[in-house]
Image (cartoon, rainbow, N blue to C red):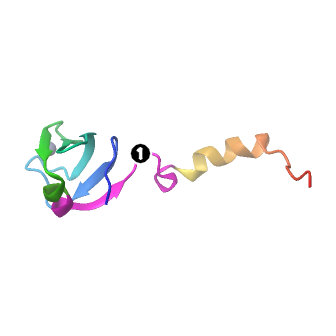
């Protein structure tokens, strides 16, 4: 599993602060993730990170956006395309 900058991950074990959602703030030989609840930054090796992650949502994942918000906006701008 690859983790890119801005990926929001959920860990199996929650942080002592009670939060379990983190944002990847640094990638490389080691990862740095920031707790979205208390703001604490933790450095982990890729192996450690993989062990702790339950799920990960990439920043550009279409499923993470709310469909209803863009739905109304796209409706008016829709233009038929089909020259052939
Ligand atoms: Zn925390």
The N terminus lies in which quarter of the figure? bottom left
Q: Against 84, is 27 above or below?
A: above
| Residue 8 horizontal side relative to residue 62, left or right | left
Which residue occupies 86% across, 49% down? Answer: 80
Work out which residue is located at the far right of the displayed protein and give it.
84
28 and 5: which one is in front?
28
Indicate the quadrant where residue 72 lies: top right
| Residue 28 horizontal side relative to residue 44, left or right | right
Residue 15 placed where, x, y %?
12, 51
Q: Which residues are drawn in magenta?
A: 50-65
Q: Would you say residue 52 sits in the magenta stretch?
A: yes
34 and 48: which one is in front?
48
45 and 55: which one is in front?
45
42 and 68: which one is in front?
42
Which residue occupies 59% across, 50% down? Answer: 68
Work out which residue is located at the far left of the displayed protein and give it.
16
Residue 33 placed where, x, y %?
20, 43
Q: Would you say residue 1 sits in the magenta stretch?
A: no
Ligand 1 image-quadrant field: top left
Residue 21 placed where, x, y %?
25, 50
User: Is the CB of mark 1 within 8 Å of ligand 1?
Assistant: no
Callout 1 secondary element: loop
Residue 12 appears in view: no
Which residue occupies 18% across, 45% down? Answer: 29
Q: Which residue is mark 1?
A: 59
Within 10 Å of the Cα at label 1, are there few (<14), some (14-19), or many (20+) other Cα atoms? some
The C terminus lies in which quarter of the figure? bottom right
């Amino acid at each position: 599993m690859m983790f890119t900058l801005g990926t929001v991950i959920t860990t199996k074990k929650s942080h002592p602060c009670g939060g379990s959602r983190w944002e990847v703030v640094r990638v490389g030989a080691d990862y740095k993730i920031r707790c979205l609840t208390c703001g604490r930054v933790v450095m982990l090796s890729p192996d450690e990170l993989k062990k702790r992650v339950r799920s990960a949502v990439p920043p550009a994942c279409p499923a993470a956006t709310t469909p209803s918000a863009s739905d109304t906006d796209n409706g008016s701008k829709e233009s038929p395309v089909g020259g052939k």
